[in-house]
Amino acid sequence: LWGVATAAAQTVRAAAAGGVRGRLVGQRLLREALLDHVAIVVTPEDGAPVEVPQRLVQAIVRMGFLGSVPEADQADDDRPVHVRLAGRWVGLSAPYGIAWLPAVDNLVTRLVSAHTKV
């Protein structure tokens, strides 16, 4: 997962410097789009595919749940990370902690009528 997190950081820097398709993009919009991107899809033998957003990958990397930054000759495979499901929540279980996020496809948006003062 270090490779996924590093690639995301490089993408943000490149897009911030040169824009996207020649157009400048705001930092906040760029970061939110990248964090919402589905970085990994895991397909279990007995179930539906599970989407892991970049936001969850960044969470375990930035909180140090993978441990220290690997040396150049050390592969990511040395640090197993397991995808967990609990109801509508997706989790990444790393050697030093676990991070959870509700599955995006399960979020519901409801329109609320405007309230007027009496």
Image (tube, rainbow, N blue to C red):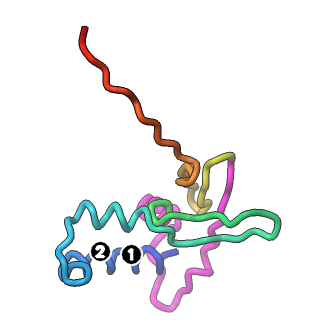
- On the image, which quarter does residue 98 sit in? bottom right
Three-letter code for the amino acid on which mark 1 is drawn: Ala
Closer to the camera, 10 or 113? 113
Residue at 57% over, 56% down: 97
List the single residue furthest toward the bottom.
Answer: 73
Q: Which residue is mark 1?
A: 8
* Residue drawn at point x = 61 percent, y = 49 percent: 89
Q: Secondary structure at mark 1?
A: helix
The amino acid type of the residue labelled 2 equals: Val
Vertical position of residue 115 compared to residue 24: above or below: above
Q: Which residue appears farthest toward the top when viewing the image?
A: 118
The residue closer to the viewer here, 69 or 82, is 82
Q: Which residues are magenta?
A: 57-86
User: Residue 105 has which mark?
Assistant: none
State the CA–CA distance, disc 2 to disc 1: 6 Å
CB of mark 2 within 8 Å of CB of mark 1? yes
Counting from the top left corner in percent of width and height, residue 22 is at 19, 83
Which part of the image, by quadrant, shows the C terminus? Answer: top left
Say which element carries label 2.
helix
Q: Name above or below for residue 100 compared with residue 67.
A: above
Pinpoint residue 56: horizontal percent, then vertical percent. Answer: 49, 60
Q: Is residue 79 left or right of residue 5?
A: right
Q: Which percent across, then down, holds residue 82?
A: 66, 65
Write the residue at 46% across / 71% down.
68
Q: Nearer the viewer, residue 115 or 14?
A: 115
Q: What percent of the width, then of the height, locates residue 83?
A: 65, 63
In-image side of 104 versus 22 (left or right): right
Residue tagged 2: 12
Residue density around tag 2, few if under 14, some if 14–19, many if 20 or more, within 10 Å: some
